């Protein structure tokens, strides 16, 4: 089953043709890792998947990203709805300048989805990211009083609080210490029962640990997209073989 289907996607920053005719499928309720060297277009592809690229008015996009039976680039599509269904966890934790509790309550309040059970919802999301026991006695404290690793788990709880179907992660463990990074990796693995996860990483070892499916990019194109066992075991393309052997990149 497919969660997202990218078809003939091209992206330009001004005149610079950055994604070149990308067609790829993101499997449902699996972890897909997008790998490749710095500058190959990983973040651009990720941000194309929930129209975050639109925030930059230099950007031009052609092609389709299909979510169920809609193309998210069709005119008339509700972009806010797309970004609710396809949430993002950034590289660095960016908690909102408010309390721990309000960070998680913020989205559900805006969407009016909590039916008066906001405390239960916040508790549930904080438990899901393993933060509840650490913060239950200081929910009113500012989110910035947490450690960086805790802040990233809080941001994940915030992303999950509006019940997305797909969670996009852009190098979301890169700014964390190794223990916090492993903590986030464990959470992402637990998420795939319920969510589709797409993780950009330049770390091949992280992709080996986490990926069910791998998309390998090079100079704005998809070189190879395959189930992880096949990708790491019998890569088809010479470029993939060289990258995995760390001869290039
Ligand atoms: P990656 O995440 O793989 O490092 P990016 O998607 O960030 O790659 O970038 C792909 C290419 O697009 C790079 O050449 C980068 O310089 C360029 N690029 C990325 N963001 C912008 C931007 N906002 N404006 C202009 N060029 C950009
Ligand atoms: Mg990037």
Image: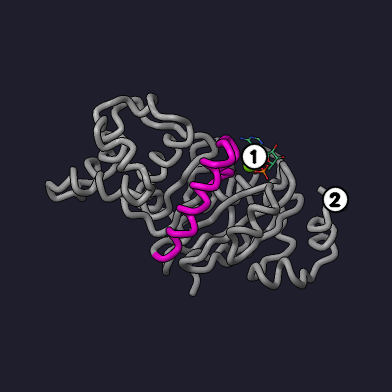
Q: Residue at x 32, y 25 (%)?
A: 142
- The answer to whether residue 76 shows anywhere in this view is no
Kindly identify which residue carries mark 1. Answer: 13
Q: Mark 1 or 2 closer to N-term? A: 1
Question: What is the quadrant of residue 110 in the picture?
Answer: top left
Distance from disc 1 to disc 2, alpha carbons, whole Å, reads 26 Å
Residue 64 vertical placement versus 99 (above, below):
below
45, 17: nearer the viewer: 45
Q: Residue at x 72, y 56 (%)?
A: 221
Find out whether residue 192 is within the magenta segment.
yes
Element on which disc 2 rests: loop
Distance from mark 2 CB to nearest ligand 1 atom below 8 Å: no
Kindly identify which residue carries mark 2. Answer: 248
Q: Residue at x 63, y 48 (%)?
A: 201
Image location (x, y in percent) of residue 82: 39, 53
- Per the rendered image, the range of residues in magenta is 169-193
Q: Is residue 12 left or right of residue 249?
A: left
Find out whether residue 167 is within the magenta segment.
no
Q: Is residue 223 left or right of residue 187?
A: right
At label 1, counting other C-alpha atoms closer than 10 Å, the crowd grade (few under 14, some 14-19, many 20 or more) is: some
163, 193: nearer the viewer: 193
At label 2, counting other C-alpha atoms closer than 10 Å, the crowd grade (few under 14, some 14-19, many 20 or more) is: few
Element on which disc 1 rests: strand
70, 107: nearer the viewer: 107
Residue 21 vertical placement versus 43 (above, below):
below
Distance from mark 1 CB to nearest ligand 1 atom below 8 Å: yes
Q: Residue at x 15, y 48 (%)?
A: 117
Image location (x, y in percent) of residue 177: 57, 36
> Given contact means CB atoms under 8 Å apart, are the residues at marks 1 and 2 in contact?
no
């Amino acid at each position: 089953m497919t969660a997202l289907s990218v078809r003939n996607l091209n992206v330009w920053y001004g005149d610079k043709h950055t994604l070149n005719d990308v067609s790829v499928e993101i499997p449902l309720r699996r972890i897909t890792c997008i790998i490749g060297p710095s500058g190959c277009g990983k973040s651009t592809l990720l941000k194309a998947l929930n129209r975050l690229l639109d925030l930059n008015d230099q950007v031009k996009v052609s092609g389709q990203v299909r979510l169920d039976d809609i193309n998210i680039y069709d005119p008339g599509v509700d972009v806010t709805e797309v970004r609710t269904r396809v949430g993002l966890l950034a590289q660095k934790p960016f908690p909102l300048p408010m309390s721990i509790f309000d960070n998680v309550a913020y989205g559900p309040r805006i969407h009016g989805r909590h039916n008066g059970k906001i405390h239960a919802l916040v508790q549930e999301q904080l438990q899901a990211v393993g933060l509840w026991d650490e913060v239950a006695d200081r929910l009113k404290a500012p989110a910035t009083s947490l450690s960086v690793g805790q802040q990233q788990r809080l941001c994940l709880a915030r992303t999950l609080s509006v019940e997305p179907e797909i969670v996009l992660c852009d190098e979301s463990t890169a700014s964390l210490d190794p223990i916090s990074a492993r903590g986030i990796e464990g959470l992402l693995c637990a998420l795939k029962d319920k969510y589709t996860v797409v993780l950009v990483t330049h770390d091949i070892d992280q992709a080996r640990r986490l990926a069910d499916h791998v998309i390998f990019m090079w100079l704005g194109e998809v070189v190879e997209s395959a189930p992880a066992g096949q990708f790491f075991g019998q890569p088809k393309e010479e470029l993939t073989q060289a990258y995995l052997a760390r001869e290039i990149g």
